[in-house]
Image (cartoon, helix red, strand yellow):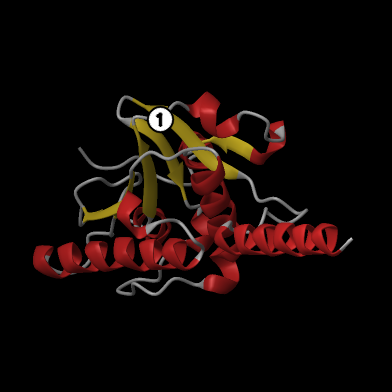
Amino acid sequence: MKKLVTSFICATLALSLAACSTPPAPKANIPVLPIAQLDRGVQIVLPDNVLFESGKAEVNLDASRSYLERIAYLLTTKTNKIVSVEGHTDNLGSTALNQKLSEQRAAAVKKVLTDLKVPDARMTTVGFSFTHPVASNATDEGRKFNRRTEIIILDEKIENITQGEAANTFETAFSRLKSMVDQGILQSPEK
């Protein structure tokens, strides 16, 4: 009997330790993630309601927590590939200022993902300043969409990330943005 109790305690301890190293499963109210297959991997874009304020690199955890928890869950349970966290800015300010700001935004998102148990060694960061706009920088609304961070799971396939997940928890990346451009609410980026 003593051997059985000891085995039970050891098994319980092992399960408890394993639970500490795995991020929690997403909550019942799962946020919809914008996702796309790129040549270089799977792109996940933080939605526009969790984007950065002008000139800031602080992550608004009240608005973004559920999205970042969901991303961390996917990164730790669906893939072991390298992740590129990529920061972007609008075009207000100097090139040097925006380069630094885009790098800070990428680093801020990486820090939150690291805190959510995504291994630091699997993530790289890069800033693109205002060189990759998704909307026109001529309007406040367009600049808002350009102040973003994207997560690219390098050399990954979208079906690996979405397999077994509820169908309504993903949308085509930038579908909302494209719809807004089509409706004339936003302008396309300047060429």
- Residue 17 spot, x, y in % from top left: 62, 63
- 176 vs 31: above or below: above
In this picture, residue 129 sits left or right of residue 3: left
Q: Quadrant of residue 176?
A: top right
- 36 vs 121: above or below: above
In this picture, residue 17 sits left or right of residue 174: right
Q: Residue at x 30, y 29 (%)?
A: 40
Name the image quarter holding the N terminus.
bottom right
Q: Amino acid at mark 1?
A: Glu
- 87 vs 53: above or below: above
Name the image quarter holding the C terminus.
top left
Q: Residues within 10 Å of mark 1 (few under 14, many from 20)?
A: many
Q: Residue at x 34, y 30 (%)?
A: 155
Q: Nearer the viewer, residue 171 or 78?
A: 78
Q: Residue at x 49, y 28 (%)?
A: 158
Q: Quadrant of residue 61?
A: bottom right
Q: Quadrant of residue 9?
A: bottom right
The residue at which mark 1 appears reads as 156
> Tag 1's secondary structure?
loop
- Residue 96 spot, x, y in % from top left: 10, 67
Q: Nearer the viewer, residue 16 or 107?
A: 16
Total number of numbered discs in the rendering: 1
- Residue 74 spot, x, y in % from top left: 55, 45
Q: Residue at x 65, y 59 (%)?
A: 14
- Residue 128 spot, x, y in % from top left: 20, 52
